[in-house]
Amino acid sequence: MTSTAPKIAFFCDEAGKDTDRYLAVGGVIVTHSDVSRIRSEFLRRKSALNLTKEAKWNSTKKASLEKHRALVHWIFSLIQKRELLFHCLLVDFQRFDHDLRTDGGKAESMKRMYYQLILHRLLKKHGTQYDCYALIDQCNELDGLPKLLKGLNSAARPYGCNDALKIIEFRDSQTEPLLQINDLLLGAICAHKNRRFEDQDAGIYKANLAGYVLGQSGLPHYDADTPKTATDFSIWNLDSKHLKGGAGT
C-alpha cells in the first residue's frame, strides 16, 4: 500500500579531526515540500556570491569568509522560520568505549552516533506524522549504516512510529546543497567545541566563522545541551554510563 504521509528528510554528516577530543554528528531536517526551493535558493546565493566550488567549512579562507558568513546568516533565517531544523550530537570520542560491542572500533562508534541522532531527532520527533528519509554524506567508514534501518524502525515503535524510516542512503555533498548547508554549521560547531581557536596555528578566518555561528545560535557555548523544548536548533552532548568513566565525569 502506497503511503500518503508527507515526507521529511534528514541530511547528515560528521565533523572532527583525528586530533580532536570531540566528534560532532549533525544534520538539517527539511520537508519534501520545501527542499527544492531551498536547494534552488542556496545555489542562487552561491552564484551571486561568486562561490563556484562546494561551500564547505574547510574551505573558509580570507577570500571566502564574508561569503560564508552571508550564507550562514541566510541559513539561520530559515531556522528561525522553521523551514530548516538543525540538530547536533557531540561526543567526547576520547572517552567513547569503542570496545563496548564485539564489532567495535571507531567506525562502529560513529555509526552508533548516527543511530542515536536519527532515532531521537528524526524519528522520535517526526516519525508519527511523516515518512522519514536519512540521507548521509558519502563516507567509506559508514559502509553498513543502511543496515540499521530495520533496527531503527523497531526502536522507534514505542514512540508511536510505524516503520516511518523509509531509507538510509548516501549522497555526495558536491551535488547536494543541503549537505553543504549542514557542513558550514557543523564544521564551525565542532571547531569551537574543540577550542581550535586556541591553537597556535589556528586559522583566523575559520575562527571568525566559528564565532559567528555561535553568535547566530544565541548560545553562550556548546558545553550544555539546549533545552528539550528547542526543536529548531539543538545541541546534545552525549553523557552516557557507557562512556569511559561513566556519565557525568
Image (cartoon, rainbow, N blue to C red):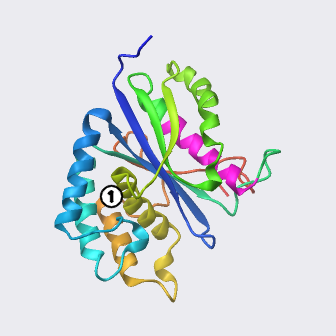
Which residue is at 20% across, 52% downward? 41
Q: Which residue in the rendered view is the most extreme toward the left?
A: 48
Residue 148 position within the rendered picture, expressed as x and y whole percent measured from the top left? 63, 35
Q: Does the magenta portion include 113?
A: yes
Looking at the image, residue 89 sits to the left or right of residue 219; the answer is right
Q: Which residue is mark 1?
A: 217
Residue stretch rendered in magenta on the structure: 105-121
Per the picture, the main secondary structure of the magenta-coloured stretch is helix
Quadrant that contains the C terminus = bottom right
Residue 97 position within the rendered picture, expressed as x and y whole percent measured from the top left? 75, 54
| Amino acid beneath label 1 | Ser
Which residue is at 38% across, 60% downward? 185
Nearer-the-camera pick, 154 or 46: 46
Which residue is at 64% across, 55% downward? 141
Which residue is at 48% across, 31% downward? 123
Looking at the image, residue 49 sits to the left or right of residue 132; the answer is left
Q: Is residue 98 visible?
A: yes
